[in-house]
Image: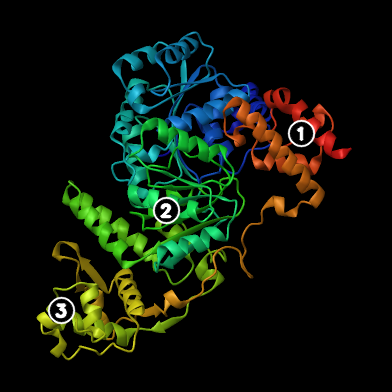
């Protein structure tokens, strides 16, 4: 189906055009839309459904909240996690919006009271989980109300082609048939082409438009390091970032507890989060993270979509994620405020082996396993990238980018060496040992080791035995990984991780391909973060005078005090960007305070006097 033409905004009624700008200004405190937002909003206001793929922190929520408050009627928002609902509802209520949520963490009376407000027309925006919305009883009740919009947050969860598929989301496909006249806004930060097509096919019964605003998060520095003693690597990394909020992703529940204990023993304010904790304990730890400054969370992937803390300064992966999409989602928790942030991933051969085992052990069909293997291979290629990492990451999503100047490979370009001779030695060892052995044994043979396994197989008498002794074991491991990433070798998971020579590898032996590899990555002192020559985005607060910094600290203190009194995260009161603008402009009247970015009419009334007192006190 061809995409419907976007109506000319001038054809909209004056009330609608004026209305969206009034909502933006009076409710949310902004004078202009960000790039890409207004076209999505106009499409929804014209009654046309939308799939919007926008980077984390680019203002996806406003794309459905502004139409919700511009149109007449109720907007129902589907959200995957209670914490995400609660934060968004709290933020909307403080902005003067009649918003509610119905979910399992509230008692029955609270949910009944919320529904009464919805049924009476008081509530403009209602948040619900998909499994609660998609019951016959709830759909029948919703059908009796003047619904003007459905919004599906984290829409990638409904695609069986994506790595974050949630079965309860699949039922949302019935919304289009049940409510054919109501537009649907599907929002996500992560969706490759297969996932996009799946969402469009399932969710939209009629016409729709798809907007792809890009995947680049230029404020995040991308780093990958070979794993070589992860505990010391983690301590060194976190130690260089004292007092900063960060997330450390781990593969297992046990490891999250180990990481949190390790950090705490070394003076870092840290805790752990995983699905094995009781629900109340998980909620308490998540609340600590979003409300406390400088807390580091060691977590499994269970800690993800519900996290909307804008000032997370880094995401550290102690283990390889399962796919590029999973990696992209997880690093997207950093730098939502637009200020500089870091993503650092450790990467070793054991990670690849474990991930491949996970795929093989899944109780799914062969097509799914092939798809997951391809996704994992794409992430390995990213991890072994020899050029700009951002180019490699964005290329996966079919987006082109110049070299970024803000990744480890751009800041400190890797040394490359012609590795054709080394590749030939690996091929010889694989062939002579019968194409039955994995990386560890092949490297032992090449280095001339006389392990029990080598001696038992009589591989110590082979011509290749000891031919690679001049190269360190760690470098051989990296060469093999890079050959796998480049497609010269493959790992036969079903064959006990045996190394196999690919057709591309055979072409190399005939002189039709060239292999180049990074030299001794474990020995390199690769910088992470901002270094000379980096084009990294500068934190706006770094440009403040000392006097303005002192005021900013006082404003943050007041914000925290107000947030604790309301049991909401500090950024729900005002984001850092608003406090920075406040410190620079130093408003002295309510009218001047209302001109600060991010201060809407409701927040001016609620908080203006408190913050003006702080500014006045600072000026005395």
The mark that comes first in sequence, 2 or 1, is 2
Residue tagged 1: 595
Q: Is residue 507 left or right of residue 169?
A: left
Q: Provide the secondary structure element on which disc 1 rests.
A: loop
Residue found at x 69% / y 39%: 556
Separation of residues labelled 2 and 1 (CA atoms):
45 Å
Instruction: Check the image and name the residue furthest to the right.
Output: 620
Residue found at x 47% / y 71%: 387
Task: Quarter of the image for the C terminus: give it.
Answer: top right
Residue tagged 3: 452
Residue 510: quarter of image: bottom left
Q: Is residue 419 left or right of residue 25?
A: left
Residue tagged 2: 259
Q: Is residue 290 visible?
A: yes
Q: Position of residue 147 (x, y in %)?
A: 45, 18
Q: Provide the secondary structure element on which disc 2 rests.
A: helix
The mark that comes first in sequence, 2 or 3, is 2
Q: Position of residue 226 (x, y in %)?
A: 40, 68
Instruction: Check the image and name the residue furthest to the front.
Output: 265
Q: How is the image coloured?
A: rainbow
Q: Is residue 567 left or right of residue 379?
A: right
Q: Is residue 263 left or right of residue 480?
A: right
Q: In the figure, 352 relative to 166: above or below?
A: below
Residue count near mark 2 (Cα–Cα under 10 Å), binned few <14, some 14–19, many ≥20: many
Residue 151: quarter of image: top left
């Amino acid at each position: 189906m061809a995409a419907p033409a976007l109506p000319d905004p001038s054809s909209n009624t004056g009330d609608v055009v004026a209305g969206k700008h009034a909502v933006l200004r009076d409710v949310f405190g902004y004078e202009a839309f960000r790039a890409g937002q207004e076209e999505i909003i106009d499409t929804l206001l014209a009654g046309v459904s939308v799939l919007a793929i926008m980077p984390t922190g680019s203002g996806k929520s406003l794309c459905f909240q502004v139409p919700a408050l511009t149109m007449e009627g109720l907007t129902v928002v589907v959200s995957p996690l209670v914490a995400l609902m609660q934060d968004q509802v709290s933020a909307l209520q403080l902005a003067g919006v009649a918003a509610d949520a119905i979910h399992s963490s509230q008692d029955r009376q609270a949910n009944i009271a919320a529904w009464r407000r919805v049924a009476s027309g008081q509530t403009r925006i209602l948040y619900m989980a998909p499994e609660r919305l998609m019951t016959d009883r709830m759909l029948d009740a919703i059908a009796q109300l003047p619904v003007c919009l459905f919004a599906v947050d984290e829409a990638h969860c409904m695609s069986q082609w994506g790595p974050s598929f949630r079965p309860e989301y699949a039922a949302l496909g019935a919304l289009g048939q049940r409510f054919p006249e109501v537009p649907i806004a599907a929002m996500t930060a992560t969706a490759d082409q297969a996932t996009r097509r799946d969402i469009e096919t399932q969710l939209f019964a009629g016409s729709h438009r798809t907007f792809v605003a890009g995947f680049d998060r230029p404020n995040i520095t991308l780093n990958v390091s070979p794993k070589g003693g992860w505990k010391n690597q983690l301590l060194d990394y976190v130690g260089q970032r004292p007092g900063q909020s960060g997330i450390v992703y781990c593969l297992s529940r046990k490891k999250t507890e180990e990481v949190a204990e390790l950090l705490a023993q070394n003076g870092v304010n840290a805790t752990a989060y995983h699905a094995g904790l009781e629900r109340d304990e998980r909620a308490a730890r998540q609340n600590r993270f979003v409300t406390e400054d400088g807390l580091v969370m060691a977590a499994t992937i269970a800690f993800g979509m519900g996290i909307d803390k804008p000032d997370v300064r880094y995401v550290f992966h102690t283990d390889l994620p399962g796919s590029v999409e999973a990696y992209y989602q997880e690093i997207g928790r950093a730098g939502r405020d637009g200020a500089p942030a870091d993503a650092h991933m450790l990467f070793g051969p054991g990670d690849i082996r474990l991930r491949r085992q996970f795929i093989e052990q899944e109780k799914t069909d062969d097509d799914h396993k092939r798809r997951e293997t391809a996704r994992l291979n794409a992430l390995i290629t990213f991890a072994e990238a020899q050029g700009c990492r951002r180019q490699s990451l964005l290329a996966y999503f079919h987006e082109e980018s110049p070299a970024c100047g803000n990744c480890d490979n751009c800041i400190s370009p890797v040394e490359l060496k012609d590795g054709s001779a080394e590749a030939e030695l690996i091929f010889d060892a694989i062939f002579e040992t019968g194409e039955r052995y994995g990386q560890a044994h092949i490297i032992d043979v090449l280095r001339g080791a006389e392990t029990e396994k080598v001696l038992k197989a009589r591989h110590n008498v082979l011509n290749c035995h000891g031919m690679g002794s001049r190269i360190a074991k760690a470098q051989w491991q990296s060469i093999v990984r890079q050959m796998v990433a480049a497609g010269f070798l493959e790992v036969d998971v079903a064959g006990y991780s045996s190394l196999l020579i690919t057709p591309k590898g055979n072409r190399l032996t005939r002189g039709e391909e060239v292999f180049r590899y990074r030299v001794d990555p474990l020995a390199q002192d690769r910088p992470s973060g901002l270094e000379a020559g980096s084009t990294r985005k500068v934190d706006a607060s770094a440009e403040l005078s000392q006097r303005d910094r002192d005021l900013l600290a006082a404003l943050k203190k007041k914000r925290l005090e107000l947030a604790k009194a309301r049991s909401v995260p500090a950024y729900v009161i005002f984001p850092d960007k608003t406090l920075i603008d406040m410190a620079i402009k130093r408003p002295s009247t309510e009218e001047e305070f209302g001109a600060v970015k991010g201060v809407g009419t409701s927040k001016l009334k609620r908080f203006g006097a408190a913050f003006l007192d702080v500014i006045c006190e600072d000026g005395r």
